[in-house]
Image (tube, rainbow, N blue to C red):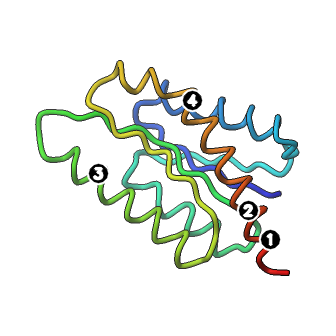
Amino acid sequence: LRIGIVRARFNDAITQALAQACRAELERLEVDESDIRLVSVPGALEVPIAPKAMAESGDFDALIALGCVIRGETYHFELVANESATGVTRVGLDYRLPIANVILTTENLAQALARQVEKGVDAAQVVVEMAQLLRGLKK
């Protein structure tokens, strides 16, 4: 399987941990390191454009979107969380490509830290399972 990963750099320590856990699980699931492409974007709102470009290339069997949005004092949290999720979902539906949306949306840093490894692992498991499912449906 060829897997594309897009990681938002905002809340960098969290998203780096997500990416590391995700890559380690992909390798455990026997996805060759040379078949994993990781790119970074500034923040969660910029995430959807990179998977869209990856999907358009036709080079990937599945995609993973990684980011972290922590609630602040303004409505900006809802805007970023909702718009990034909508964009990521749209890419998967428009291109019929499995995409795991692991843009964490948490109330605080402690919640993000508690989820950074588990959700990275989950993302890898989801895309491998879905990519294999879709391959089976094409037969």
State the SS at label 2: helix
Discs 1, 2 touching: Cβ within 8 Å = yes
Image quadrant where one finds the N terminus = bottom right
Q: Which amino acid, by three-letter code, is at mark 4? A: Glu
Discs 1, 4 touching: Cβ within 8 Å = no
- Name the residue rendered at 54%, 35% in the picture: 119
Q: Compare marks 3 and 2 and give the one earlier in the sequence.
A: 3
Residue 51 sits above or below residue 24 on the image: below
Question: What residue is shown with label 2?
Answer: 131
Quadrant for residue 61, please give it: bottom right
Question: What residue is shown with label 1?
Answer: 135
| Left or right of 128, for residue 107 | left
State the SS at label 4: helix
| Left or right of 83, for residue 138 | right
Q: CA distance from mark 1 to mark 2?
A: 6 Å
Q: CA distance from mark 1 to mark 3?
A: 33 Å
State the SS at label 1: helix
The location of residue 117, given as percent across then percent down, is 57, 26
Q: Compare marks 3 and 4 and give the one earlier in the sequence.
A: 3
| Left or right of 13, for residue 123 | right
